[in-house]
Image (cartoon, rainbow, N blue to C red):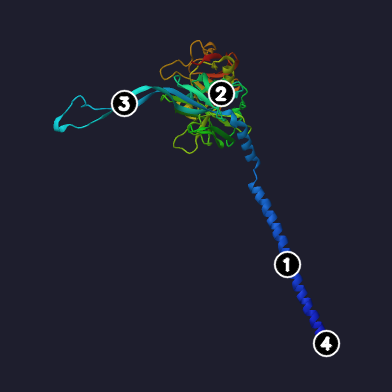
Amino acid sequence: MEKETRKLLTVFLIIGITGSFVFGFLGGIFSLNYLNKELFSEKENQTEVVLGKSDYEERVIQVIQESDDSVVSVIATKDLPVIEEYYIDPFEEFDYLGPFDFYFQIPQYRQKGTEPQEVSSGSGFIIDSHGYIITNRHVVEDTAASYTVLMNDGKKYPAEVIARDTIEDFAILKIEKTGLKSLPLGDSSKILLGQTVIAIGNALGEFQNTVSHGVISGLSRSIQVNDSYGQGIMLNDVIQTDAAINKGNSGGPLLNLNGEVIGVNTAMVSGAQNIGFAVPINKIKNVAEQVIETGEIKIPYLGIRYVLINSAIQEERSLSVNYGALLLKGENDEPAVEEGSAAWQAGLQEGDIILEFDNQKIDQNNHLATLIRQYNIGDTIVLKILRDDQTFTKEVVLGEHLMD
């Protein structure tokens, strides 16, 4: 009886141990499966976060989609000679030259009429639904060329150059097309270093509406550029960006994340890595409105020659201030104050320092030329002037400077 009882207890013990093992094993598998599902689900969620678009990316994409159709390519064509090659035999008038007779031809070239050929290309953007377009002056500076605007949808329109601004390197074109989508113009006085910007343009003249983006790398830069005739032009108070600006991007928009134009792409530094420049839109807005209304570029005008004062100029000339605009003669002895101009009528003199323009301090970050462009012809402004260590104010009515 005891043996049978022990056997029975042994059987129950074996069954209990085996059952515990089986249930434990199955429970472990279930736990592992559950854990794997949780981990896999978490990884899926993590993958969604990685692959999903951030708010920043969404904004950049939205700006590009909303702006793309308003950016155009500007193509210049000219009637150029067609040269053909032909050959002559200098000895053809001789019937026979004896044992030295041979066949000989000399290549010659001659013009065979002319044909229109593409000579350059750049970019532009629509600023008015009735076909007005902004580009760089140097994109359309050849008065002997004809110009065509190529839209993003592939359609082409002949373009008329309405006006060229020889000072700020921009021009206005007009095409006979209405119902166009224009780009909103922003406020370039509010841009900040490090701010994200987007450039769109006809890169290298062959990659239409190429997009690049970067940040504002510098403000109030002054650069020396050459036009297609090799003439040096000084551009002041331009925006520096690391957004790629390539040949052919000239005239295209520099946009902020609100989709507003804050600059017109105009130059790059060859041999450098992503150093490009744009003309601030505030220099252009008022003038562009005048062109649309009158068909001419008329800019407010003081009639002075000056140098912007910095610490180096202060030390060199022993000045009492390190900011402002010092009125000086030109290199060829041109007067510091143009006779008959607004400044001349207000009594400004060579050697005067304009410290403020309508309560705005003039310094390296606030150029006088840029401030003037933000006003209209006939506006009355107040100048704060330093003369012989005496400070005083003068009211000046801005005159008119008509571009050629």
Which residue lies most toward the right here? Answer: 1
Quadrant position of residue 125 = top right
SS label for mark 3: strand
Q: Position of residue 229 (x, y in %)?
A: 41, 24
Q: What residue type is labelled 4?
A: Glu
Which residue lies most toward the front here? Answer: 95
N-terminal of the two: label 2 or label 4? 4
SS label for mark 4: helix
Tag 4 residue: 4
Which residue lies most toward the left here? Answer: 98
N-terminal of the two: label 1 or label 2? 1
N-terminal of the two: label 3 or label 4? 4
Frontmost of labels 2 and 4 is 4
- Which residue is at a point 69% across and 54% down the rendered structure image? 42
Q: Where is residue 401 in the image (x, y as percent from the top left)?
A: 52, 15
N-terminal of the two: label 4 or label 1? 4
SS label for mark 1: helix
From the viewer's perspective, is 25 left or right of 273? right
Tag 1 residue: 28
Frontmost of labels 2 and 3 is 3
- Please tell me how crowded label 2 is: few (under 14), some (14-19), or many (20+) other residues with Cα within 10 Å: many
From the viewer's perspective, is 251 left or right of 83? right
From the viewer's perspective, is 18 left or right of 75? right
Q: Distance between the residues labelled 2 and 3?
A: 41 Å
Residue 315 visible within the image: no
Tag 3 residue: 109
Frontmost of labels 3 and 4 is 3
